[in-house]
Image: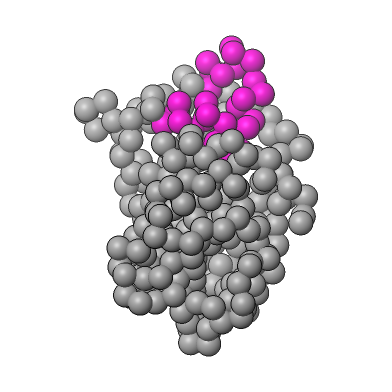
Amino acid sequence: MTSFDAYERELWAGRAEAYERGFARLSGCTVERLLDAAGVRAGDRVLDVGTGPGPVAAAAVRRGAQVSAVDADPEMAEAAARNVPEAKVHVAVLPSLPFAEASFDAVAGNFVINHVGEPAAALEELRRVLRPGGRLALTCWTMPGSGVLAVVHHAMEAVGVPWPEDVPASPFMEYGRREAFGDLVGRMFREVTVDELDWDFEFEPEEWWRTGAMARVGSNGVVLARQDPATVARVKEAYDRILAPYATGNGRVRVPAHALLAHGVR
């Protein structure tokens, strides 16, 4: 386990409920596209890696697939098992999965590859558990973060909050572009395609603030939690200013989101 993996385990410990109430709604917007890219059909043996509270597993079950799911955080795995009782849910940390070679017809990972310390090693393990001819599909956020993903970070930058040296950047930063992501996945898979996913995400700003930044979800939340109340208030003012142009007129905002979807064949 790398130092980044250790940081991730600490980062997400105790965050499952807050993540499910907030950020999971954003990441869930790509679920059907992900499963389409993985070619998931009734009867397929599907692995949902980095399941979180289980939206990909649930959607695969609705398609009639036989679903196994893994997450590195025990509370996330518990939430997935509760939400998707039809799935077999395990706690496992990439790049080590508790499955035999060629166990699955399809492997899907929704915004998990950017949360591992060794992306290439993780892909090698996903290839191992996928049968020859099986399909892999992975999403990641575009890097550097933009749109809704970057609102809190940009608000902290606007008021001069420094980024702590002990909060590491994801090793995936260099791969969060279309060509780089494709090159990475193409090292171990064939017929690789990377699609750009762009959509507008609508949310209520106060709720998003409570369930994200103030709930210590993600690295931005960790950094913000270290600030004094006056600084947090200034960041909140900047957050409101950034979101103001996206207001829909009903107390909500609609902000662009940008991600990548890579898919290929074992």
Q: Is 191 placed above or below 175 here?
A: below
Quadrant of the rendered image containing residue 252:
top left
* Residue name at image x 46 percent, y 52 percent: 81
Q: Residue furthest bottom?
A: 132
x and y percentages locating residue 27 in the rendered image: 42, 50
Image quarter (top left, top right, bottom left or bottom right) of the N terminus: bottom right
Q: Nearer the viewer, residue 39 or 208?
A: 39
Note whether residue 98 is visible: yes
Let me know if residue 103 is in the magenta part. no
Task: Please tell me whether the stretch drawn in magenta is mainly helix, strand or loop.
Answer: helix
Q: Nearer the viewer, residue 123 or 51?
A: 51
Q: Specify whether 242 is left or right of 183.
A: left
* Residue name at image x 70 percent, y 57 percent: 117
Labels in figure, total: 0
Let me know if residue 226 is in the magenta part. yes
Quadrant of the rendered image containing residue 172:
bottom right
Q: Is 40 placed above or below 257 here?
A: below
Q: Is 208 placed above or below 201 here?
A: above
x and y percentages locating residue 45 in the rendered image: 44, 75
* Residue name at image x 60 percent, y 48 percent: 73
Q: Which residues are magenta?
A: 208-235
Note whether residue 196 is visible: no
Q: Nearer the viewer, residue 25 or 156?
A: 25
x and y percentages locating residue 222 in the rendered image: 63, 32
